[in-house]
Amino acid sequence: MRLQPRDRFDVEGDYEILASLEVVREVTNGITIDATAITADANGDKIIKKGMPLSKLASGKFVPYDSAGTDGSENPTVILKRTVNVKDGDHVVGGFEVAKVIAARIPVTVDDTLREKMPGITFA
């Protein structure tokens, strides 16, 4: 007799990025994603993957981390909590300020530079 739970179905993009729930601090009142700064794909979607480091611009809105950026996008402060499509305009979403995350599930390369810029995030 098998007593272990089985997945009945998989939800695309619903993977766990947190390595631990021991110390987690979420952003209060969410963060606003700047839809105009996101490039659309062939279908017109502007998808930002769960786990993406986000940086705050001078406008107060957030964009995906860009290590080569010069507009503030090079300084990430939060990790995106859920995958979001901003094709219809700006979205307010959740994020983690402090957390232990699984580095292999982050959609960008986790290097020493990113680790230094995000002291509240532990990449496991």
Image (cartoon, rainbow, N blue to C red):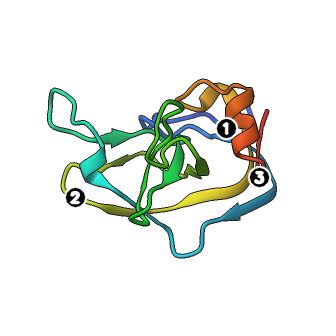
Residue matched to label 3: 120
Q: Amino acid at mark 3?
A: Gly
Dividing the picture into quarters, in which one does residue 83 lie?
top left
Residue shown at 74% from the left, 51% from the top: 99
Left or right of 2? Residue 22 is right
Residue 52 rendering spot, x and y as whole percentages: 52, 40
The local secondary structure at tag 1 comes to loop
Q: Amino acid at mark 1?
A: Pro
Number of the front mark, 1 or 3: 3
Real-space CA distance between mark 2 and mark 3, rounded to the nearest whole angstrom:
29 Å
Residue 89 bears which disc, if any? 2
Residue shown at 16% from the left, 26% from the top: 42
Q: Quadrant of the N terminus?
A: top right
Dividing the picture into quarters, in which one does residue 25 lie?
bottom right
Residue shown at 30% from the left, 42% from the top: 38
Q: Of all residues shown, which one is farthest toward the front?
A: 70
The local secondary structure at tag 2 comes to loop
Mark toward the start of the polypeptide (1 vs 3): 1
Q: Of all residues shown, which one is farthest toward the right?
A: 22
The local secondary structure at tag 3 comes to loop
The correct choice, above or below, for 90 with respect to 38 in the image is: below
Left or right of 39? Residue 13 is right
Real-space CA distance between mark 1 and mark 2, rounded to the nearest whole angstrom:
39 Å
Residue 90 rendering spot, x and y as whole percentages: 29, 61
Bin the neighbour count of mark 3 within 10 Å (Cα to Cα): few under 14, some 14-19, many 20 and up. Answer: some
Residue 66 bears which disc, if any? none
Residue 97 rendering spot, x and y as whole percentages: 67, 58
Residue matched to label 1: 5
Bin the neighbour count of mark 1 within 10 Å (Cα to Cα): few under 14, some 14-19, many 20 and up. Answer: few
The correct choice, above or below, for 90 with respect to 36 in the image is: below
